[in-house]
Image (spheres, rainbow, N blue to C red):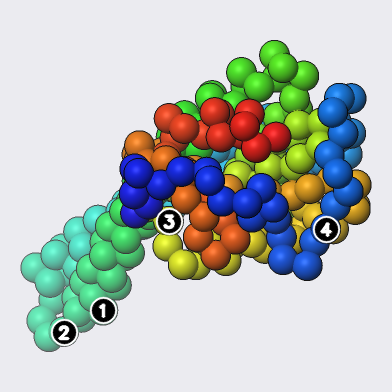
Amino acid sequence: MPSKRSTLSAEPRLGVVPGWTSPARPSCGAPTFRPMKTVAIAGHSVRQSARRHYEHAGTLALSGAALLTGAVLIGADAAGGVAALPCAIGILAALEARRQLRLARRFTVGATSEERVGSRLWALEERGWLVAQDVTKDGGGNVDHLVQSPAVTFVIETKTSHARERDLEQSRRHARWAAATYGPGREVVSVICVQRSGDHPRLLGGVYVIGAPHLVGFLLDRG
């Protein structure tokens, strides 16, 4: 994880999408904000995924219990391996229900992290910035948070405890999408906010990785 001693002493253009250039940022003026598919609720998509996994887990658990019960009843009344098949299917259903439950809990934790980061960002609206949560991308996928100052578009992904290499690549893809969406008049900065980290901003592979307590201050300084 990034060191708490790291600072923002790097040159200002770091963090911009490779190959992407923008003119000097204006000193004032309201940001332009293209209408996007967003529900304006941080973590909404992830919480919906968690709900689906919980429902699937419940259905599988009930099915598995019914099959195992049936296997016991059949086994009590019949000889041979008549009960083997429903017993095996019931066990498989129970194991899959357990896996779905683990996924649901993971998504629930992720949704809570996004909600907490999202709640920090609303304060920027008081400064005239524009904040969108859970933004749907053309072609599929979503961006956790998208923030616009008068000159800079910040594409922000939330992670609960750490950022992995694949998370950096995901963030760069989102930044390329934002660059293509908003045109050459805006600078695009890619950010990963780690909810359970207190680390200061650090640049990793063109992406700023930041602990949640330092996110808003970084955006204000950078925007």
Which residue lies under the disc numbered 3?
Answer: 163
Name the N-terminal-most of marks 1 and 4: 4
Tag 1 and tag 3, C-beta contact below 8 Å: no
Pointer 4: what residue? Answer: 21
Amino acid residing under circle 4? Thr
Task: Identify the image quadrant of residue 39.
Answer: top right
Q: Where is residue 31 in the image (x, y as percent from the top left)?
A: 85, 31
Residue 70 in view: no
The amino acid type found where label 3 is placed reads: Ala
> Residue 171 appears in which quarter of the rendering?
bottom right
Please tell me whether mark 4 sits on a helix, a strand or a loop: loop
Mark 3 / mark 2, whichever is N-terminal:
2
- Residue 134, relative to residue 173: is it above or below? above
Which numbered disc, 1 or 4, marks the residue closer to the eye? Answer: 4
Q: Are marks 1 and 2 in contact (CB under 8 Å)?
A: yes
Query: Can you identify the residue that label 2 sits on?
Result: 81
Image position, residue 201 (x, y; %):
47, 44
From this view, report whether residue 123 is shown above or below residue 79. above
Residue on which the image places disc 1:
85
Specify which label sits upstream in the sequence, 3 or 4: 4
Which residue is rendered at x = 42% and y = 62% of the image?
164
Q: Measure the alpha-carbon separation of dots 4 and 2.
A: 70 Å
Q: Nearer the viewer, mark 1 or mark 3?
A: 3
* Residue with the most extreme bottom position: 80
